[in-house]
Image (cartoon, rainbow, N blue to C red):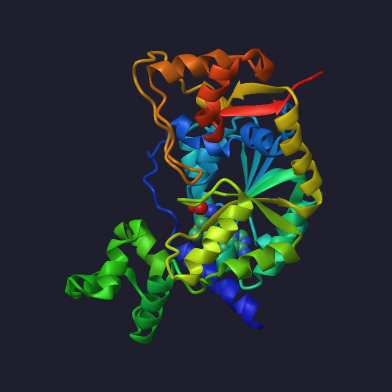
Amino acid sequence: MDRSSTVHRAVKAHYEKHVYPRFPLLTSLRLCDTYALNLDALWARFNGERLDRHDKKILLAGCGSFSPYPTALANPKAQITALDLSKANLDRAKLHTWLHRRFNVDFVEGDLLGAKALLGERRFHFIDCYGVLHHIPDAGAALQTLHSLLDRGAILRLMVYSAPARRSVQAARTALRILGIADVAQIKALYKKAKDSSRFRGCIESAYEARFDWGLADLFLHPYAKTYTLHELLEALQQARLEPIQFIHPGALPDVDAEIQRLERLEANNALASNFMLFAGRAEDSQKRLHWRQEKKDQDTLIALNPAIQKSLPLLPFIPLKPGPKLGFENPVIGFKANRLLARFKRPLRKSALGPDRWTAIQPYLHALFLTETSAPP
Ligand SMILES: C[S@@+](CC[C@H](N)C(=O)[O-])C[C@H]1O[C@@H](n2cnc3c(N)ncnc32)[C@H](O)[C@@H]1O
């Protein structure tokens, strides 16, 4: 058996044993917190088009046990396919979505690398592959498969481990392997004995996931977790004819080239503290995206509410709403004034009808994707 299939088996066995993430089944989310998974809003942002079609298709490539639920909440009309290697994760995800009365998800057990055989000719408008690629030895082949599954103009969300951000975790993993530590109870016992100043204690205390058994298993017992430098990531994307269209990790700059330069500087100074999170698109669609960026500068557009925000605007506008940050920056609060401003866009309005003050006032909400902008019909 070659190394790749040995790793594949080990990764599957890991997730059959350690369901990830293991949130309580009653964990529910506010609809407003799913705003950045809403396909209509994403399509508007990158393509400037309204995706009014009935065949909105979403693929969760390596869905884990939870992500089908928020994705289905954000996209009640979409056909969602949740693909995962692990039956245990799929069973848990199924239970979670059904308990929360979300029934628009098909669950498929299998390997992302074999997705074309599993999914046939289907193409998707949005693919979420979050925290998965770094667990696949042939990530290049996985990216090429993802590319082949993207429809024209489609959006891919990725998260991969960054080498500098994961340095202390990777060092702890190696140390634990050398010590022969292979279960969560032993990791917790070691943590209890660790000195306050120890690097192991620091590593555990700085990782949110380390508060949970499933998180400790994922951090320290995973059979395969590669980390990427920025250069490696960009190279792998380019090889698969994909390109970053927006970075969304904490602190990311809105402009892709400016963000790449910032990440290069941080890497050079050993100061990069976050993993890479981004939206990517097919290189073939680059002209389409460029055309939209130009069009929105020069021509009239339609401004509308993100459907996930529209349904969340409080009926009592004096109760402030602050959706959790999903695009790398703190969101504006929707207080009384903002509620009234945003409520005007329950029906799309033309940019030309807004006047300069209102146009300025809505900029933070456009930036945050609470509002969307699309081409206006002539
Ligand atoms: C760290 S979890 C992330 C889950 C989910 N995307 C999330 O963000 O919560 C990685 C998931 O990818 C799945 N996975 C790993 N390799 C895979 C492969 N080759 N094909 C399909 N799924 C895979 C695992 O079973 C696991 O559920």
Q: Quadrant of the C terminus?
A: top right
In this view, 9 is above or below 306: below
315, 352: nearer the viewer? 352
Task: Say whether residue 286 is left or right of residue 219.
Answer: right
Q: Quadrant of residue 46?
A: top right
Which residue is painted at 58% across and 76% down in the image? 7
Residue 248 image position (x, y, % from top left): 53, 49
Task: Say whether residue 219 is left or right of residue 78.
Answer: left
Residue 324 image position (x, y, % from top left): 42, 38
365, 163: nearer the viewer? 365
Residue 150 image position (x, y, % from top left): 74, 49
Which residue is painted at 36% across and 45% down in the image? 24
20, 334: nearer the viewer? 334
Q: Tell me if residue 60 can be seen.
A: no
In this view, 89 is above or below 337: below
Residue 71 image position (x, y, % from top left): 55, 39
The extreme front residue here reads 356
